[in-house]
Image: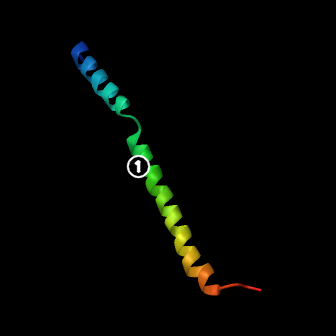
Amino acid sequence: MSTTPSDTEEEDRCVEEIVRRGPLGAFAVAGVATAIVVAIYFIFYFAAYLPRGAVQ
């Protein structure tokens, strides 16, 4: 299975187009993970800390 130079050039153009767009998927995953962590923090705060009130 050999590739012709035109196939290689087409693949190179496709790869360069993908790289030019940047790491959008990585930013999306990081954003979703951060949002989940923040949501869990607020849920824990409102469900566990506030109902107890001031502990002396």
Helix, strand or loop for disc 1: helix
Looking at the image, residue 12 sits to the left or right of residue 53; the answer is left
Number of dots carrying numbers: 1
Closest to the observer: 23 or 56?
Answer: 56
Quarter of the image containing the N terminus?
top left
Is residue 2 visible to us here? no
Residue reaching furthest top?
5
Looking at the image, residue 50 sits to the left or right of residue 55; the answer is left
Q: Tell me what residue is drawn at x 52 percent, y 74 percent.
A: 43
- Which amino acid does the dot numbered 1 rest on? Ala
**Quadrant of the image occupied by residue 9:** top left
Is residue 20 visible to us here? yes
Quarter of the image containing the C terminus?
bottom right
Looking at the image, residue 40 sits to the left or right of residue 1; the answer is right
Looking at the image, residue 48 sits to the left or right of residue 21; the answer is right
Residue reaching furthest right?
56
Q: Tell me what residue is drawn at x 55 percent, y 80 percent.
A: 47
Q: From what the image shows, is residue 4 above or below residue 34? A: above
Q: Position of residue 28 (x, y in %)?
A: 41, 49
Q: Tell me what residue is drawn at x 39 percent, y 42 percent.
A: 24
Q: Position of residue 30 (x, y in %)?
A: 47, 50
> Mark 1 — residue?
28
Q: From what the image shows, is residue 49 above or below residue 14? A: below
Within-10-Å neighbours for mark 1: few <14, some 14–19, many 20+ = few
Q: Tell me what residue is drawn at x 48 percent, y 56 percent.
A: 33
Q: Position of residue 31 (x, y in %)?
A: 45, 52
